[in-house]
Image (tube, grey):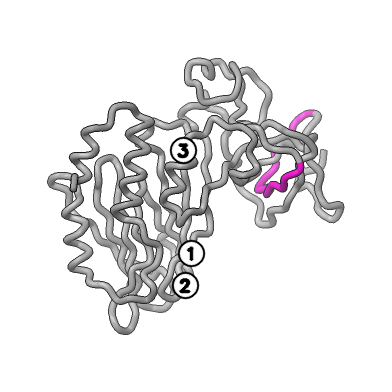
Amino acid sequence: MQTYTEMNKEVKSPETKAIKTFLLFSLLCFSLTMSGQTVSLEKAEREMLENANDGEEVKKQSADLNGDGREDLIYSCGYGEMTGIRVFLQTGDGYVEAVNTGCTSFTLPTSPAENRQLQLIENSGGESPFTSYRTFIFDGTSARLVENYIVTNKDYTEGRITVPSSLTDNPYQVKTLTNCNLRFSPDLEVFKNSADIGFTLGRHTNIIAVVKAGVRLKVLSEFPAEGRTWLYVEVEEQSIENSQVTDFDAISSFNDHRHPSLRGWISNRYVERNGKEKMMYSK
């Protein structure tokens, strides 16, 4: 069987390289739970070292991830351009593996909390105009995927707003009245470089997808503008009519067969909402 390093040398294009990296991780690493089975930490370290880059060390940090007062362990190690992540939750009898996957980078909040979050970020080594975010929380001896989405990489958008400065604490749903455009920024201005980069729908636009009519979207924030309010929404993959996002299949191989959603901006002119729900900003 080829090692990760040997397979990585065969990659030719950025797109193929990213997909092979994702799929390889799904074969080598993927496992969200271990059904309560106690595992050997020494064996896990050996497995990570066997697949690591030459000279790469396995890094280990501790944190109480599930709020039970015990120190849990997060292992990380470089595999090619990716980082392997394995999380072990401490029990009274040993450790149980809760997460075993890969990412580009990860963040772990430092402030104490009953359930601390682990966020994994994947951006194909900066070669893709889209970045994936996954967030896990931990309860008892298992991990739960609570966020799983793709956003546009801000390095490709001429410095425009791609995500709001804050998200609402009370997201609500809207229903699309017709097919409508999902944009990476809350505006209709010309995007000069889109024809060269080729990740938007149409020339010189900020449109990244077309959303189907009659589907429900989760609104996470709003941005008031003249004549309309831009809604920052999360769109499930099955609600997308057409998209230039090519990372869906590759990224979803990590996610327990749960396909990530896509976040972006739509105009409030093309949606309806429950009469009891109110916009966060008035027109």
The C terminus lies in which quarter of the figure?
top right
Front position in the image: 12 or 75: 12
**Mark 1 or 2 closer to N-term?**
2
Q: CA distance from mark 2 to mark 3?
A: 29 Å
The spot of residue 158 in percent (x, y) is: 52, 23
Do tag 1 and tag 2 residues touch (Cβ < 8 Å)? yes
User: How many circles with numbers are drawn on the protein?
Assistant: 3
Contact, mark 2 vs mark 3 (Cβ under 8 Å): no
User: Which mark is first along the chain, 3 or 1?
Assistant: 1
Quadrant in which residue 206 is drawn? top right
Range shown magenta: 214-226
Residue that sits furthest to the left in the current view? 55
Task: Name the side, left or right, on which 172 lies relative to 166.
Answer: right
Please, what is the three-letter code of the amino acid marked with disc 1? Answer: Arg
Q: Which residue is found at the position 71% from the left and 36% from the top?
A: 230
Q: Residues within 10 Å of mark 2 (few under 14, many from 20)?
A: some
Identify the residue under disc 2.
139
Looking at the image, which residue is at 53% across and 54% down?
Answer: 147
Secondary element type, mark 3:
loop
Give the SS element for disc 1.
Answer: strand
| Amino acid type at image mark 3 | Asp
Q: Residue at x 47, y 20 (%)?
A: 197
The percent coordinates of residue 271 (x first, y second) are 78, 40
- Callout 2 secondary element: strand
Mark 1 sits on what residue? 144
Residue 86 at what x, y percent from top left?
Answer: 31, 60
Residue at 42% across, 49% down = 253
Dominant SS in magenta: strand
Viewer-nearest of labels 2 and 3?
3
Q: Which residue is mark 3?
A: 247
